[in-house]
Amino acid sequence: MRSKVHQSIYAFSLLVLAVGIPTSNAVMNLAGACLFANWVLEWNWKEKWNLLKNNRLAIVLAAFFFLFVFTLFQTDHWQLAFQSLASKTPFFYLPIIMASSKPLNIKWQRFIILGFVISVVVSSFLSLFIMYLKDIQDIREGGLFISHIRFSICCALSVIFALYFSLQKNGYSPAIRVGCFAAAIWLVIYLFVIQVFTGIFVLFIVTLAVVFYFLFSHKKSKTIRLLLAASCIFLIGLLSDLAVITYQYYHYDATGEANLPLVTSQGNEYEHDRESMIENGEKIGLYVCRRELAEEWQKRSDSSYYRMEKTLIRYLNSKGLCKDADGVKALTDKDITHIEQGIANVDYTQIIGLKRVLYPTFFSLSLYKQEGITTHSSFLQRVELWQASCRVFSRNYLVGCGLGGTKSELGRELQRTDSDLPGEMGCHNQFLTYGLTGGVFFVLAFIIVLIAPFFDKKRTITLLYVLFFIALIGSMFTEDTLETVAGLNLFLFFNSYFLFVVNHDSF
């Protein structure tokens, strides 16, 4: 009886932790504490040790936590270091607890994954509802409990799980399969609606991995062939659309520049900056009459013209309108609202589409090329952070900067090079972060921990685990995935869950 109670608490705690990953840091911490307390109170140490002896991989994974302890000797930021060390404890207890606990029945194994998917789907609907209710344009302000980037990774991972369940014919009811397929479709749409690059990137590399897997797989059923053909058509269409959009943005017809009008329809003089940037296939600095813009804007809006001038000019340019009184008059009330909200391009208002993702990036690249400014592009900021991180790493490649000291060292490097980025930012690359934390050997140890499951002869590495692995490792190249509670638990929970809990023969 006592054993059944502990087993029930163990299963329920895993479910709560899975549900908490996309919703709440507090729930994750509480579930982790319950898991550990229940594991200790079971008090069946002999049985646990026998299970661990058969799961030496768990000991290897858990041992990585103690490498963080060694980095304390290098740090000068003791308070941050101990806070960070406390947050890293899932590295130790999650693989140990899951590897040394009695196996869950197959229904619980499936239900825990489904609980995670349902939690992500519900959270996605709630986040969009909050954005609509509060008229929020920036997804970062519409998040619920965890960062929008980590949540986008949760979405991409849920797509993988939901599609896996929807394709299983044995042990899953038609209702569950249809529901999972609908959830996968919705989450793909959601990722393109919120336009978070990390989630879309993870989804893209996973799709490529699936295509290559089935392309070289010897077993190709009719369904697999159809899915493979559909995936290839999708990728070709995506790349073609990308090429067309890029051409439309940068292609400028300069034949009309020789006969540009000198005055507006009201007789006021135009400014024509022929060296200005190209956006939406037009030069932003052509056909500008600031006097008329100021006068007409004040008739349409209570917002200060001088505060909105650059946004107004770019918005008019994106609609192919002259930057004069006639152009402002041609704007709709909705256009005026968009400009007041700081939206500088009409294509940024698309609900879904590649233009909404690519055009801000294109503009940022042009701005960086012309003025060396990176603050308008998260991609360019990452590039500058990676370069600065590499310079810091080159000076501390043996032992790093110690736990808790990476951001301050990186901040000093950014300040030294007069970067326009704010100080004490993360590296936005997990491998660089660990390189700055503990040096080259720390990174090598981390890589060994990542690939160790593939060399364990007792492990059956399934396609589902490989796709999970690709998704999370892919995110680590553009994010400090493991430096937040959500990201750390997302990786460590599912890594241990698939390795030590799931029975892949019947899952």
Image: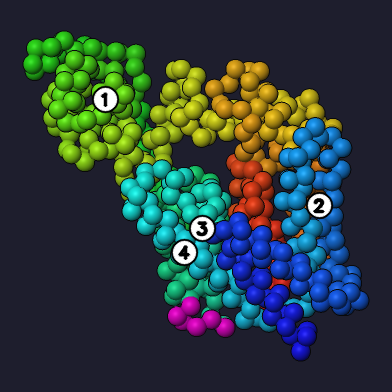
Residue 493 placed where, x, y %? 68, 62
Give the number of the mark in front: 1 or 2.
1
Q: Which residue is mark 1?
A: 304
* Pointer 4 or 2: first along the chain: 2
* Pointer 4 or 1: first along the chain: 4
Which amino acid is tagged 1? Ser
Which amino acid is tagged 4? Val
* Pointer 1 or 2: first along the chain: 2
80 and 246: which is toward the camera: 80
Q: Residue at x 58, y 21 (%)?
A: 419
- Picture quadrant of residue 435: top right
* Pointer 3 or 1: first along the chain: 3
Q: Secondary structure at mark 3?
A: helix
Residue 411 placed where, x, y %? 65, 27
The image quadrant where one finds the N terminus is bottom right
Residue 325 placed where, x, y %? 14, 23
Q: Which residues are magenta?
A: 171-176
Q: Neighbour class for label 3 at 10 Å: few (<14), some, many (≥20)?
A: many
Q: Residue at x 68, y 23 (%)?
A: 412
Say whether marks 4 and 2 touch (CB < 8 Å): no
Q: Is residue 172 magenta?
A: yes
Q: Which residue is mark 4?
A: 121
Q: Secondary structure at mark 2?
A: helix
Q: Which mark is residue 67?
A: none
466 and 38: which is toward the camera: 38
Q: Secondary structure at mark 1?
A: loop
Q: Residue at x 17, y 34 (%)?
A: 331
Q: Which residue is mark 2?
A: 65
Q: Is residue 30 visible?
A: yes
Report, in whole angstroms, how far the alpha carbon at label 3 lies from the one at label 4. Answer: 8 Å
